[in-house]
Image: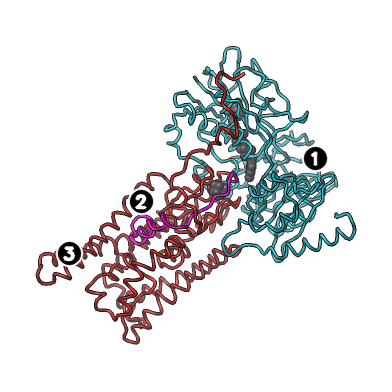
Chain colours: A red, B cyan
Amino acid sequence: MVRKGKSAWLLHDLTHRGPTAWLLTALLVAFYLLLYFTHFFTPVAHSLGLSSKWTLYGLLYTLAILAGGVHVLRKYRHNRYQVVRTSVVMFVQVVFAFSIPEILQFFHQPEYYFSYFWPLKFDDLNPSVVFHLPLFYALYSFLGALLLAPFLGVVFGKRWYCSWVCGCGGLANTAGDGLRHLTSKSSRAWKFEKISIHAVLAVSVLLTALLFVSYGLGSRAPALARFTYNFQTVYAFLVVATLSGVVGAGLYPLGGTRIWCRNFCPMAAVLGLVQKLGRFRITVKPNMCISCGLCSKYCEMGIDVRAYAQANQSFTRASCVGCGLCAEVCPRGVLRLENARSHAPQRASLVQIAPLASAASPSPGRPR
Amino acid sequence: MRYVIIGNGVAGVTAAFTLRARDAAAEILLLSGESDYFFSRTALMYAFMDRMSLRDLEPYERHVYAEQNIRLVRDWVTNLDASRRLLTLQSGSSLAYDRLLLATGSLGDAPDWPGLDHVREGAVHFVTLQDLQRAESLARTTREAVVVGGGLIGVELVECLVYHRQKVTFLVRAPWYWPGALAREEAEIVSEHIRRHGVDLRMDEEVAEVLAAPEGRVRAVRTKSGHEYSCQLLGIAIGVSPQIAWLRGVKTPPSLGRGIQVSSSFQTSLENVWATGDCAEFSANGQSLVEQIWYSARRQGELAALAMLGHQVRYDLPIFYNSAKFFEIEYTATGEISPSLPGAQTFFCRLPGREASVRITERAGSIIGVNMLGARWDHSIFERWIAEQRDMDYAISHLAEAQFDVEFGRVDLASVSGAYREWRARSAGTGSPS
Ligand SMILES: Cc1cc2nc3c(=O)[nH]c(=O)nc-3n(C[C@H](O)[C@H](O)[C@H](O)COP(=O)(O)OP(=O)(O)OC[C@H]3O[C@@H](n4cnc5c(N)ncnc54)[C@H](O)[C@@H]3O)c2cc1C
Ligand code: SF4
């Protein structure tokens, strides 16, 4: 039941898809449309002494993460995992995603983002970009995407990136914290996610392959070059601008904070596949779950955590970003994030039925 | 074969799924008068506190029942005729069964406080969905609330009312909070915490009279100590009892005591009728036993289904465990946790710098109970230690194994071992540890 009072009503309305939420969505979508598809913000940026609209956007983004981060640090101050993780995500945003690229530019170095990797940062493995970077940055791009990220994914799970480092996750877990429960938990949403996220991954891998081939053939294959160029333009429009920007962040108040991360991010797809093979899992304390559903409700990735917890089933789900909020909200301390050796399944059974031997012994005949 | 289950709570639903898992062909009907779908009663408070919608309380997606081919019927059962294997429903229709499971759960106890019968509005329990609706509609017009009863449901209701910015007085009859499970020192941690949330927690207070305004709304509660607490909402949380009143008037009532009396294989006195969960009453070594927690209802639901399927089942009381949360303080209990156990010795210590404590009880060289506040522990490890009859030294030196705190957030156990060594030394000195 909603609390009494206007401010409580407003907060509820904003976080439960009320008119206020729709209004905010409209504003956010308009903001992203103007940002990606017009030059509206360029003079604004210049008048503030910033070099481009993207710097302005980066500044706003960073401020949102800092303000949201302070709120989240206070809200979960009793939970050391949340405190450490949130501090790291704020630090990474300020230092690696905002300051260092600016400083590099100041020293006439490439504007390089050490906290983003291919395929999320698509150009990192775009030959016509990466081969023109100084050696150090080029190596970092290749090794980061192909070795470092998957390796850390095996050891720590996807979370090392998606909820500790990445800016998209950073915004979701700080400024977006109050909207995390909006992600759909239905099994239909899960089916959609499995198709959509792997489709985007496949497209981005294909496009990268094409870029390499076309780069290698150069002027010998003008038709391929043109096709690849068009392909790249469409990808930038659809995936980068529309799905990660307008839809991913614009629809926060309606669809929750991880629309992009859950359904479309190719980096999340790669790390998800790695996670399934790796050591990360959520351990379920046996027979302690009261099926209250808080864990599912507050899962920003739409995982029906309760389905596993009430079946006493520890699990690893490809989509889990390891934010740890399920463990935080669980009133019975049922869940724990772990980098454990033993592997855990993906599917939850309905009930965990005790083996007959321990509970009952079969007898032919009817009872009594 | 048609199985009919009365009650779609955790016991009834677990039974239905278990039946289905072992008998693909059976016809399974699940009845409830309270709700269309199984919901988590344990999460009522989160609905009241706007953290969950009612739909969120449902542990299974709705299509699961169709997939499992379990037919849901929303109706109250009003009559049971075991000789004809026939139920009558409130809607007037009747329903035949081959095997019947009673999983009717509990209702909040109604006290006989003078004046309560004049109250037409403002007194609520906090057990059913209908209770929740009543509480919600009252909360709108309430500034001050009184909650009576120092158990777990009471403190949950208090937390809800605090969330709704009401001035809450919490009346507890015992000298300290929840003496059935908490020692005085533990109760102090919890009481202090509850008070810090702005609750006026009063111990040793027993209701003498309930006062109503002329139009029937509750106005105040007077206690035996002579205090009068004004309120527009009176939360009654003095306990729950099996929901069996309706069975007393049916054509063939099963044998009833505090609950529906069953054998250790869940059989009632009626042929082809079983009972399970909160409503079932067992007798173990001459003692009557009604378990009224989620975990037992779940386990019992599963076992009762096996019994109905013709398996030989014996329900032996497992090692007790439970958990709760008092506002932010989490609580885990395993084994015998009553603070006054004859012949037992108890080690207790507070963890420095937080609202947390450790209490381990030992009898004849083996630990029998573990009671933990404020940190997270895996009760199944304690269960194992108790079953293996480990001693206190073992428990203390292996405590880390049972820790279940979040990463980076583990409580520091050095202070526990330190306190334990001191306690040992002291008890060796006096010869009889306290
Ligand atoms: C507020 C609250 C918080 C709780 N928190 C915890 C907790 O944290 N941990 C814990 O272990 N336990 C907790 N419990 C106890 C736990 O919820 C119960 O033990 C458990 O729900 C019992 O399940 P059950 O299936 O036996 O009965 P119920 O869940 O009560 O289900 C019985 C169903 O049968 C229906 N029914 C009864 N008679 C009829 C009839 N004649 N016709 C049709 N339908 C009928 C009822 O309406 C009800 O829907 C809590 C209880 C409450 C009220
Ligand atoms: S929050 Fe905890 S108790 Fe509630 S459903 Fe999830 S695991 Fe179970």
Q: How far is mark 2 from mark 1, CA to CA?
A: 59 Å
Circle 2 residue: A193
Marks 2 and 3 sit apart, C-alpha to C-alpha, by 26 Å
The residue sitting at the right extreme is B430
Asked if residue B42 shows in the view, the reply is yes
Say what amino acid the circle numbered 2 marks: Glu
Q: Is residue B120 visible?
A: no
Q: Secondary structure at mark 1?
A: strand
Q: Of marks 2 and 3, which one's residue comes earlier in the chain?
A: 2
Secondary structure, mark 2, is: helix
- Which amino acid is tagged 1? Glu
Task: Residue A267: name its quadrant.
Answer: bottom left
Task: Tell me the element at label 3.
Answer: helix
Q: Is residue B303 above or below residue B269?
A: below
Q: Which residues are magenta?
A: A261-288
Residue at (28, 54) in percent of width and height: A199
Instruction: Give the labeled residue for mark 3.
Output: A230
Give residue A28's position: percent from left, percent from top: 37, 63
Q: Is residue B387 left or right of residue B97?
A: right
